[in-house]
Amino acid sequence: MTHQECINCKAKYDIDEIIYFCKKCGDILEIKFDFKELAETLKGSDWKTKPLSVWRYRDFMPIHEAAHIVTLNEGGTGLHRSQRLGDELGLKQLYVKNEGENPTGSFKDRGMTVGVTKAVELGARHVICASTGNTSASLAAYAARAGIKCTVLIPSGKIAYGKLAQAMIHGAKVLQVRGNFDQSLEFVLKLAEKHRSIYLLNSINPFRIEGQKSLGYEICEQLNNQAPDRIIIPVGNAGNISAVWKGLTEFHKLGYIKTLPKMTGIQAAGSAPIAQAIKTNSDKIVPVEKPETIATAIRIGAPVSWKKAVNAIRESHGTAETVTDEEILEAQKLLARIEGIFVEPASASSIAGLIKLVRNDVIGKDERIVCITTGHGLKDPDTAIKQCEKPLEVDADISAIEQVLGLKAQRPTILAR
Ligand code: F0G
């Protein structure tokens, strides 16, 4: 039977119980399947004929009925062979899995289509989250789609403008908290415990992780049913790296892939408790009290899913690395200029991490590598514009334009008829 299970003490809870932490030990939960049952279902299913998307994997999702799915057509994002960036770094096989191609411009939509579908299934009329921006944009859109109320708490002044615009236009109640993301998350956890009619959709909610695990499935299917050697992924609250790993291990267990990739988590230097724990070989993280980085999406000091993330990295023999704001911005520009892919700063941290790990000889040149870019560049236009030269202003006159372009003014030629 599919159920919810504590990642620590393995206490089991019904799939329809609204619960965010284990009642026995207080740790976080995950969804567990009966693999025999799942394999049976898959045998008689036509899932492989469906288009690449989150709901291609409907049989792998803990949702009872297909009739009430809340969707905007998420997943099925491009896995782009990145020849020029690969050549630049001397790599044989580099790919970028661009999650900015999702409906609201980030990977969060994979989790929200499943999370909000579950919310509706459970009869919730009001959903809530804390967010550094993308989660709030996505939840606001899916709540609007489902016709339910949405409240989001964001750290005041520390989210990119595009994301704020999304949450507002979709009609969410947006509260700017004078504090950081970690504090906002504490408030929504308390609110959801205290007011049981409000359903919490941060990545602590295991149904969101179920949607996001499809990212792992998709990468393997796009590589002709093979796992890459390494997946490089930005880490903030640590839900996504855990989700991708869950998807990969499920595909492995079901026999769809033969190997598993090294999970490589990248954090911003000013908010890197997980990278720190990996580097010091520690069993615990030391939360960063005042996290700072230009990559506001991953400006998180106390990642709630840190245990799952540390597990994923250790089990897969992967690693974690930190990157500075300068390295992030350089990588963002490089990717935009030589691959045509515009991503927000947090997303570019996976590229910055790749560059650093190649330079430090941690990554082998022959590895087949997938870098996940998590959110679209237009989410944060201000940071992009600040990095570029200002456009030149010219008179509305062809010779003035020719002059700035270095083109000699030519006499118009009369074409022979
Ligand atoms: N990249 C982007 C663009 C994000 O928005 C986030 C998280 C991450 C990476 C990190 O993912 O938290 O699963 O490790 N954004 C959250 C939010 C926290 O509120 O939008 P994670």
Image (cartoon, rainbow, N blue to C red):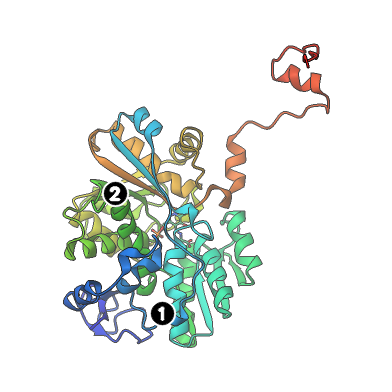
In which quadrant of the rendered image does the N terminus lie?
bottom left
Kind of residue at disc 1? Ala
Give the distance between the C-alpha atoms of the residues marked 1 and 2, in whole angstroms: 28 Å
Q: Is 348 displayed left or right of 305 in the figure?
A: right
Kind of residue at disc 2? Leu
Q: Is residue 238 visible?
A: no
Q: Earlier in the sequence, mark 1 or mark 2?
A: 1
Could you say which disc has been placed on residue 223 in the image? Answer: 2
- Image quadrant of ligand 1? bottom left
In which quadrant of the rendered image does the C terminus lie?
top right
Q: Is 203 displayed left or right of 282 in the figure?
A: right
The answer to the question of whether label 1 and label 2 lie on touching residues, with beta carbons closer than 8 A, is: no
Report x, y in % for residue 284.
25, 61
The number of discs equals: 2
Vertical relation: 359 (above or below) 62: above
Q: Residue pushed farthest front?
A: 417
Q: Residue at x 50, y 46 (%)?
A: 343
Between 50 and 376, the residue placed more toward the observer is: 50
Q: Is residue 184 visible?
A: yes
Report x, y in % for residue 116.
47, 76
Between 374 and 258, the residue placed more toward the observer is: 258
Q: Residue at x 69, y 15 (%)?
A: 406
Q: Is 250 displayed left or right of 62 in the figure?
A: left
Report x, y in % for residue 161.
62, 55
Report x, y in % for residue 381.
60, 46
Q: Residue at x 37, y 54 (%)?
A: 235
Q: Secondary structure at mark 1?
A: helix
Q: Which residue is mark 1?
A: 66
Q: Secondary structure at mark 2?
A: loop
